[in-house]
Amino acid sequence: ETGVTQTPRHLVMGMTNKKSLKCEQHLGHNAMYWYKQSAKKPLELMFVYNFKEQTENNSVPSRFSPECPNSSHLFLHLHTLQPEDSALYLCASSQVAHPGQGYEQYFGPGTRLTVT
Amino acid sequence: GENVEQHPSTLSVQEGDSAVIKCTYSDSASNYFPWYKQELGKRPQLIIDIRSNVGEKKDQRIAVTLNKTAKHFSLHITETQPEDSAVYFCAEENTGFQKLVFGTGTRLLVSP
């Protein structure tokens, strides 16, 4: 499959569960991102990785734990989530650019997460 | 601070009319301003972007204008079609490297 893929597409989990979201990009990019999309904050950046190194943690609670083993794969490990964490989680990737140079972010289809 | 205000939140037009969506930002150091379109149930996709050294950019029926002094930029869609119906997000590249701050989105509905 081409572009950015995410699995699973839908996930229902209890507050005591541990689960992981997976993202894979087939575009040769070196930067990857996690976003949270909800009715309250439509596109909220969570984490940024450049060349496998985390460069941004946008004040995200520790119950969300990212992992980037290589430039093509990105994970989001979830544990002891709250109902308000229910949202669409979008992964994206891009080329690494100099500040102000601009870059297109390619989004995956997202994982619809429901916390019960 | 990191803040992008986007207006209106919803916009309904008749097919063939023009649509304008406006965004304002607070970080005077921002240099890159993309617009993304998200159709219902689909992922956001870039439709046009502009950099701070350019005041206007056009691509067929869509155009973006930037006023750095006033810190606002706008998306213009002419001759709207039903397939333009979607949520549109503006964004700015915050001074945090590789970091986009998105507006709250505008739901555009084009009626035939």
Image: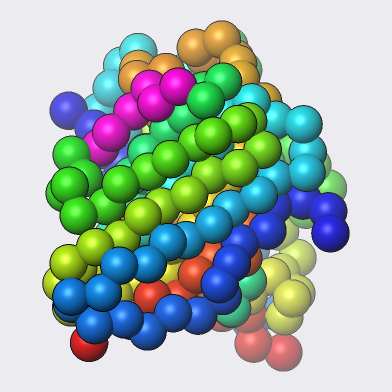
| Magenta stretch holds residue A56 | yes
Residue A80: where, in percent of width, then height? 17, 67
Residue in the picture at 56% in, 72% down? A8
Instruction: Describe residue B27's horizontal placement relative to residue A69 as left or right.
Output: left
Q: Nearer the viewer, residue B100 or B90?
A: B100
Residue A18: where, in percent of width, then height? 30, 67
Locate residue A73: give its quadrant: top right
Residue B14, can we see it?
yes
User: Height in image: B2 above or below B48?
Assistant: above
Instruction: Describe residue B27's horizontal placement relative to residue B54 as left or right.
Output: left
Residue in the picture at 59% in, 67% down? A7
- What sort of colour scheme is used for the picture? rainbow
* Residue extent of the magenta highlight: A53-58
| Magenta stretch holds residue A42 | no
Number of numbered discs overlaid on the protein picture: 0
Residue in the picture at 68% in, 58% down? A5
Residue in the picture at 17% in, 28% down? B1
Image quarter in which the C terminus of chain A is found: bottom left
User: Height in image: A2 above or below A79?
Assistant: above
Q: Main secondary structure of the magenta part?
A: strand
User: Height in image: B86 above or below A26?
Assistant: below
User: Height in image: A2 above or below B96?
Assistant: below
Q: Nearer the viewer, residue A75 or A33?
A: A75
Residue A3: where, in percent of width, then height? 77, 51
Image quarter in which the N terminus of chain A is found: bottom right
Locate residue A94: give its quadrant: top right
